[in-house]
Structures are given as C-alpha cells and as structure tokens.
Amino acid sequence: MNTLLRDVLYAFRMIVKTPVVTGIAIVSLAIGVAANTTIFSILNSWLLRPLPYPEADRMVMVWENELSEASDFEAVTPANFLDWKQQSTSFDALIAADFTTANLTSVDRPEQLTVADVTPNFFSLLGASPILGRTFLESEGGDEDAPVAVLSETLWRNRFGARSDILNTILTLDGSSVTVVGVMPETFDFLVGSVNLWQATDFENRRDDRTDHTLVVTARLKPGIVPSQAQSEMTAVASRLKELYPETNTNYGVNIETLREAFPGTTDRALIQLLMAVVSLVLVIACVNVAGLLMAKTDARHKEIAVRVALGAGKGRLVRQLMTESIVLALMAGALGTVLSMWGVASLVRALPSEIPGIFMPQFDSTVVAFSMGVSLLAGLTFGITPAVQAVGGKLRSALVETSRGGTATKGKRRVRNAFVMVEFALALTILIGAAVLTDLFHQRLDIDPGFDVTNLLTVELTLPEHKYEDDASKIAFTEELHRKISNVSGSSGLALMSTLPRSRGVPSTEFAIDGRLIDEDSKPNTAWLSVDLNYFNTMGISLRSGRSFSNADRADAPPVVIVNQRMVDQFFEGNSPVGERITIQETSREIVGVTNNIALQRLSGLQPTLSVVYFPIAQRPVQRIFMAIRANGDPHVLAAPVQEAVWEIDSDQPITSVTTMEEHFKSMLAGPNFMAAILVIVGLLALGLAAVGIYGVMSYSVSQRTNELGIRMALGASPRQVLAKVASQGITLAGVGLLMGVPGAVLVVGAIGKIMAAGSSNGLTFARSIDLTPILGVSGILALVGLVACYLPARRATKIDPVVALQVE
C-alpha cells in the first residue's frame, strides 16, 4: 500500500511538472469520455435500463400480422382479442389498449385529450399505482357499469390545478359523463404513447368487430413459458379463428415479441448501437492523442529512466510507475469528462423529440457515472501501456553517455508515434465523412421543395365529436360555416381545409381500380388520399397541371369527382393525362377532373418514394378530423386568437389543437432526423478538434527534440524557409497517409447507416440516390488544412531557433 501511495504521489509530481502536456492530455481525454458517456446515456436508457414494470422479462407484445403484407406487426381486432383471452393458456393475463382522442367539454375551455380505452387489469399488470385515488376494479368496464377514468398527472396539474378534491369529479368526454377515480404519477408511462386519460372497458361492446385493427395487446407469460411456446399456441389459436371466421381472419396470423424486442424498434436499436460505435472512435482518437503525447514525454525522460535502471530499478517496477501516472492522468480526465457529460446529458434531454416516451429519456444516473469512470480507467490502461513499454525498452545505458539536453526518439519510437498520428487522421476522416455525407443526404432529401408555399400559413387541427357530428350532412354544414367565419378574420387571405397536413405521419391509403381495366381483386393498387375543400389548391399554392380544380358545383349530391397528382399519372396512366377517365375508389366510381403537381405529403418525403395521391372534394368525402391552413398577410401567429374565437362562435364546445405554423409543423416532423444529423456533426467536430490537437502536440514535441539538429542546419546555411518546409512536410505526409487510410472506414459507416434505415422502413425508405462527392471532398480538404496548420505552427517556431543557443549544448 505504501508503495502504491508513493507511486501515486510521484505520478502527481510528474504530471504537475509538465503542465502543457498534462493540460492537453486531460482535455483531450475528457472530451472523448464526455462524448461517449453522453451517447451511452441514450444507449442505457433505450437498451440497458430495466423497463419499469414488474417481471418485465416475462412481458410480451401480441400482434396480428397480415400474411400477404411485408409488415409483420399490426394492431388487433377487439373480437380476436376476446377470443385470445378465452382460448390461450400461456399467459397470466392479457391487456389491451385502444388509443383515441376525445373532446373534454362543459368546462371553461374545451380541450382535445389523448385517451386510452383499456381493460380493467391494465394498471395491475403494469404494476402501476396511483398517487391519488385508485385504478380500475376488475368488475368495471362493462356496458352496464358507470364509466370511470384515471387522469395523468400532467392533465391533473395543468388543467385542474392539481386539486386534491378531483376524485369523483364528473367530466364530459364527447358528450358522455365519466367519473374520475384516480390520478397516475408523472413517472408512469406506457411505451406506445403519452396519454392524458384512461377509461375502463372490457371491449364486449365490440364483440363482433373483426375488421378494425386498433388494439395494442400486451401479455405476461406464465412462469416457465418462453415466447416460442406462446407463439406456437397462438398460431394454433389463429388457425382455429381462420376456420370459424374465414371472411375476416383468413389472411391473418399472430406474432409475439418480447417487450424489449418491441421497444425500441429494430431501426432505433441499430442506429443507437451504430452511434455508440462511431462516438467510441472519438475516444480512440483521444487515447491515441494522449499516447502520442506520453511517448514524446517519456522520450524526454529517457535519461532519467536509464539512471533508475542503472541504480537497480527493475523494468517491471518502472512500467508500473509509468502506468500509475497514466491511470492518475486518466482519472483526472475522467472526473472532468463526467462533469462535462452532466451538461451533455441535460442538453440531450432538451434536444430529443418530444414524442419520445419518458421511459427512454436519458438520465445521469449511477450506471452512467460508472460507465464514465470505467471508460476513463480503460483509456488510462490503453494509452499508457505503449509509452510505458517503449520507455523501458531499447538500449537504456546509451542514454547515460548522451551529452545533449533531453532525449532523442529512436526510429522505432518515431514510427510508433507517426502511426498514432496517421490512425488519428484515419479515424477522424471516417467519422467526419460519415457525418458530412449523412447530413448532406438528410439535407438534400428532407429539405426538398415541398411543392407549395409554406410561408405565412397557420395550421389548426379540429376533431369533430362523433356524438355531435355523426352524419355527413352535419360535418359538411360545419365546414361550410367554418369557411364563412374564417373568411371574415382580419389579416387572412385564404383558407384551405384538408384531412391530412403535408409531411405527416400515417398518411391514409386505400385500394382503387381504373374503370374499364381488368384487374385481379386480390392485387388492387393502393393510393394515398385526402379530402380537401375547393380553395385548397389555390390557398396552398399547389399548381394545377391539367383539367380543373374543385368548384361549388362539386357538392354531396353532384356526380362524384376526384383530382389526382402527377405521380399517379406517371405510375398508373403511363404519363398520359387521365382527365375524363374514371376510377373506382372507396366503392364509388368517380371521374378524374384534374391533375396537380406532387407535394411532400409524407413525413420523410425525399427519403421515401413519392406517393400517388387522390384528392376528394370534402363535400363528397367529409371527415371527422379536419386541418385548417390559413394564409396570413403577415405573421401567421397573429391569426391564432381570432381563428379560435371564430371556431367557438360555431361550436363553443369544439376543442382546437395543434395551433402552429406550417414551417413549425415541418420542423417538428423532422426533429428526429435533424437530431441524428446534429449528433453526427458534433461527433465529427470533436474528432476534428482532437485530431488537430494530436498532430500539433506530436509535432511540437518533435520540434523541441530536434532543436539541436535544426540549429546545426541553420548554422550551416539552411534558410528559415527550408527548415519550415522540412518540418512541415513530415506532418503533412502523415496527415495525407492517414486521410487515405480513413476512406474505407467512412464508406463502411455511410453504408451501414443507409442499410439500417432502409431495413427499418416499411414504406420504402431509400438511400438509392448517388452520394454527392462535395461533402467528401470538403471534409478531406478541411482535415488536410487542419493538418497543415497543426504542422505549420511548430515548424514556424523551429525557424525562430537561434543557432548559437542550439549549439551551446554540443
């Protein structure tokens, strides 16, 4: 113990003795540790941290799957779920949740809530307890039972002021009364999505529904039952249901996956792992950095080490001492890196998209701290071993007869140090090209022309309650009145109504057939569809390519018509104008009266193939969920309040949600890809900075060790320019070789992410467009410039050497 303490104290003395080297080493390694710890916090929260449910390892998701489709997972019909409960024996319990929206009314301000209709055993299976009141009783949820609800803590706090007397309060949801019986804690989160309110139901009122795939089903396996056994049993159950209900169940099977397999999904899991692998390269660069610095430092201590050997110190003892110095240095860097990572994790939480469940939000917990310190220790061993072994190797006795001040690195040591520099540049290039190419891909694919003017558009979402607007006539009357009211709002110059906003998730699609063409009923083509009003194309600024737009004549009792986009023309009409032709869609034959330009309808438009789209006049295909886009003469935010008032003049109980501009909506939809691109850019810049510090540090030490040589050269007539060229060329050569070494790694990183994103897409996500060489050449040029500057500065210092002073040591 005393020996270890002496080693540690001596290590501190030697570390303090060289503050410049120590500072560069600590900062370099701290940056690498902080970057890895920050990204590890994501990996920990998504993949390693236990899910917050009792016996989560026995919990599984039970999906239906349409055998003829590529997708393996689909929500479950209520009737099939109820049959599963009766016929399965592999589960302790099954729960189901149906996620919908409901309008909270009979209050000062109507509000649309995200609601989950769940089986009464929902909370008990998830092991969740309320902070107020109770959860559901097994006897609740039937048609004859009084409707009961449990509130989320967020709704309770924000809407009801965290009132302690909220229990037994009667709320009005979509015109029906429901009694509040409990409040869940803020920490409770179900993986599928955030919810404001849960209602109990046994789904018996949908006992015959085998067509609406809306339920998310979770189960807990019985002790001793493994997922494969449950899968075999449920496959047999699905086969029986096919025989009993061939019209609805023939094409459906059952898939089981563990909760950990289901959340996060395959794509997210692979991206996180790849991101962790990429950021680990930053730590490798930092370790190489420090190893190079320590090798240069130990060269300067070569005579000291030789003296200690001559006095009887064993090489093993010296290696231990040098390794102690490395580990002490690493722990100091780890402490700084841990502090930096606290800021990094906090920044991550603020930057992550809001739709991510709270369960997956990164936390700076004990696991993350342990990882930070463990990485630091590992780094200390990694970067310390090579300099320590090199320091005690070679002909130590020759150092005792050297007359020059300081050691001079042998060719073998210079080769190792040069290899470190090349590895740094290779890794930096790998990371930077991967980051630059992917950022460029995201930019050129996602930041595309949306096909319309997105500026000065305020978007508003309305969901009409079915109990009030249950037939088409009432929905049409509401939209017509909406047009009249909004048209009178001062500062607006146009209104468009639509069933789906551009760049949204879950664009609806349906089968169709072109009239007069023979087609197999089992292989009808699909198309996306929207219901829009007659001002939609003009207000949005979407150009009409041929035919006409919708008009007041296209009313509910008029001949059915549609407008299609150019993609549908190219895909199904061989590029020929289809105006005047008819298609049968949603069980009605309709005439095509116009063709429009394509717009960015999908969330990841640019990364996904352009959709064919059919537009219905909203009077002929009214919808429950309506989006408004109001064109403003100036700042669209100014219209928010008067638009809300106009809606409430029509229906004072109508909630208004998602009031935002079109540009803000786009930004929200692209938050995930932009976050990924930002992380890659930050990681790439860290790699660039560390590589620059590394080559600068090595070149600086190299120049200091060659003081005598350079002084002699200048004394013999070498000009400062020649000395500058001589010193700089060495570093530039190393950087150039390192750049060449990094190209294959960069190609592998870009290819890996492209494959991950393509494999994880169910709707054709593709990186098929050729990669632009501009970011590759740009990054290579930047790295070369960094290498040049890092070499130039110490080389320029070499030209300032006074030959007389340098020769005094000879």
Image (spheres, rainbow, N blue to C red):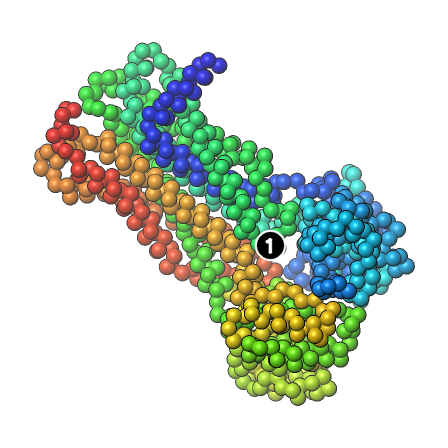
Callout 1 secondary element? loop
Q: From this viewpoint, is residue 470 visible? A: yes
Give the image quarter of residue 398. top left
Report how many numbered discs are placed on residues in the image. 1
Q: Residue furthest left?
A: 717
Q: Position of residue 55 (x, y in %)?
A: 73, 39
Please, what is the three-letter code of the amino acid marked with disc 1? Ser
- The residue wearing badge 1 is 354
Residue found 56% across the figure and 68% down from its top: 637
Which residue occupies the foreground of this view, 146 or 493? 493
Q: Residue at x 21, y 17 (%)?
A: 401
Work out whether residue 426 or residue 492 is closer to the camera in this orientation and state it: 492
**Which residue appears farthest toward the right when viewing the image?**
144
Point 55% across, 76% down: residue: 491
Q: Nearer the viewer, residue 697 or 198?
A: 198
What residue appears at the point 62 percent right and 86 percent down from the top-left corner? 551
Across and down, in percent, residue 179 comes to 83, 56
Q: Is residue 381 above or below residue 68?
A: above
The quadrant in which the C terminus is found is: top left
280 with respect to 209 (left or right): left
Whether residue 316 can be seen here: no
Choose top left, top right, bottom left or bottom right for residue 81.
Answer: bottom right
Which percent across, then down, holds residue 317? 40, 16
Q: Residues within 10 Å of mark 1 (few under 14, many from 20)?
A: few
